[in-house]
Amino acid sequence: MNTPPDELVIDSVTGIDVALPVAGAGARALAFLGDWHIRFVLALAWFVAAGLIYNGRLSLSAPGGNEPTWIGAVVAPPLAIYFLYHPLLEIVMRGHTPGKRWAGVRIVARDGGVPGIGPLLVRNVFRLIDSMPLFYGVGLVLTVLTREHVRVGDMAAGTLLVYDGRNAGLPVAVAAAAGEAPLDPVGLELAAELLERWPELTPAARVQLGQQLMTRHIAGIVPASDEEALRAQLQQLLRAPA
């Protein structure tokens, strides 16, 4: 199938292809700027508050001799906040960060699902290359020139950024739930499609497709083996808060 350069097309378990709009350089830059401001403010706030408390006066001057307690209490935490912000939040928020939510984008694997911990860590390690020589020069150039708007970290990890389900042209009922359900954008559309086709399928097909969908796109939930219980699970997941 010929795929437009701004879409990721995934073969679904229901036999219907799902197309996810790929986020371009502009959306990436917007998400990055949002996250940069958040982590910078958090890191700065810690440094100022801890420095004032440590010194016991209105001064942020480091004590003489580079005291280990000063480094451990005042300097190290802001550095950890700044450099671990992306990998930790992308893992905990399953491909999101506050900046990405604000920009309406998320990280996905090539199959449309949520990337594992390994790919997310690899993606962030390669920020060192993407940030060269200044202001993410390498990463910005690549996201403009490459077909899927990916940077070096995405190439190494097998990931890319797509617009979230709320902006991806999903069916109305699904789009309304996209910001609340614990499903990725592909899972949202597949769940809605499967429930719509439910009466047309045999009981065995319902169970097989429903279990495959939940296993592939939802973490931490064991799919039911009974078709009616499985249908109720899917309906609940579309309505449930994250």
Image: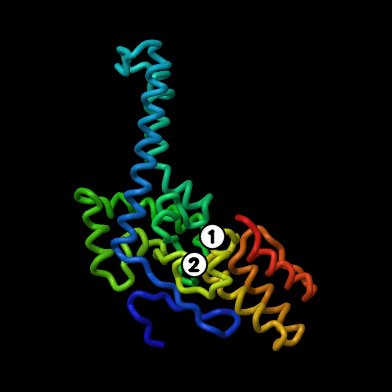
The answer to which quarter of the image holds residue 65 is: top left
Q: Quadrant of the N terminus?
A: bottom left
Horizontal placement of 143 versus 181: left or right?
left
Q: How is the image coloured?
A: rainbow
Give whichever of discs 1 and 2 has the lower sequence position.
Answer: 2
Q: Position of residue 214 (x, y in %)?
A: 65, 69
Residue 158 in sight in this render: no
Residue type, label 1? Gly
Q: Nearer the viewer, residue 186 or 136?
A: 186
Q: Nearer the viewer, residue 7 or 72?
A: 7
Residue type, label 2? Gly
Label 1, secondary structure: give it: loop
The answer to which quarter of the image holds residue 119 is: bottom left
Residue 146 in sight in this render: yes
Give the Cα separation between the discs numbered 1 and 2.
8 Å
Q: Position of residue 32 (x, y in %)?
A: 34, 52
The residue lying at 45 percent from left, 55 percent from top is 101
Tag 1: Cα neighbours inside 10 Å, few (<14), some, or many (≥20)?
Answer: some
Residue that carries the numbered disc 2 in the rendered image? 165
Q: Which mark is residue 179?
A: 1
Tag 2: Cα neighbours inside 10 Å, few (<14), some, or many (≥20)?
Answer: many
Q: Is residue 27 above or below residue 194?
A: above
Label 2, secondary structure: give it: helix
